[in-house]
Image (cartoon, helix red, strand yellow):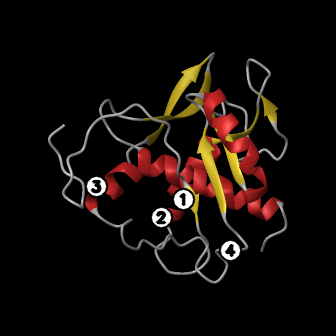
Amino acid sequence: EGDRAPNGSPLTFKKCIEVGHVLKLGTKYYEAMQATCLDAGYATAEVCDWAKPRLTRRIYPVKGVGNHDVPRPIWAPKLSKTQEGRHRIHLVGVDTAKELVASRFEVADPGPGYCHLREPHNDAAWLRQVTAERLRTKHVNGRAVFYWWKPEGARNEALDCRVYATAAVKCLLGLGFR
């Protein structure tokens, strides 16, 4: 409360579903290669109901799933049923996607895998969010298990967006786009 929107109108808090994570692969291919992943981890039924009539426009309800010590693909091509069994969603292997995103930030020279950062994805706040989580190790039953750790209070929405954009790319590659 008290903050203002870019047009000067006051901002107010409202409960809503985040609809976003749109991936656009350049303006030349935008129309042919648009894909959107909607996070259905919260308000699953509402997100799925909203997305269902839009599936032909490549708007997919997704749920991020940790690897839990089992390698999981970034994009599962087969739909999974939700717990109540009424909706179908794509599962995203978020740990695998985070590893890929993190590895791309380590590529120093432009070329395959290089992460191009343009406005608005190059300011300090965005960079803090996209690098908020750290890969850590814990030992379970004598085995090393890797997991992504987020410091308390840290914001990671930019990383989540990048993970779901990566999943959308994997989806498009699975559909035959190159």
Q: Is residue 114 above or below residue 23?
A: below
Cα separation, mark 3 vs mark 4, equals 30 Å
Quadrant of the image occupied by residue 34: bottom right
Element class at badge 3: helix
Q: Circle 1 sits on which residue?
A: 103
As drawn, the label of residue 31 is 4
Tell me the quarter of the image containing the N terminus. top left
Cα separation, mark 1 vs mark 4, equals 29 Å
Cα separation, mark 3 vs mark 2, equals 19 Å
Residue occupying the point 68% across, 36% down: 48
Amino acid type, residue under disc 4 in the picture:
Glu
Q: Are marks 3 and 2 in contact (CB under 8 Å)?
A: no
As drawn, the label of residue 125 is 3
- For marks 2 and 4 on the same chain, the one whose residue lies earlier in the sequence: 4
Q: Circle 2 sits on which residue?
A: 106
Counting labels gives 4
- For marks 3 and 2 on the same chain, the one whose residue lies earlier in the sequence: 2
Element class at badge 4: loop
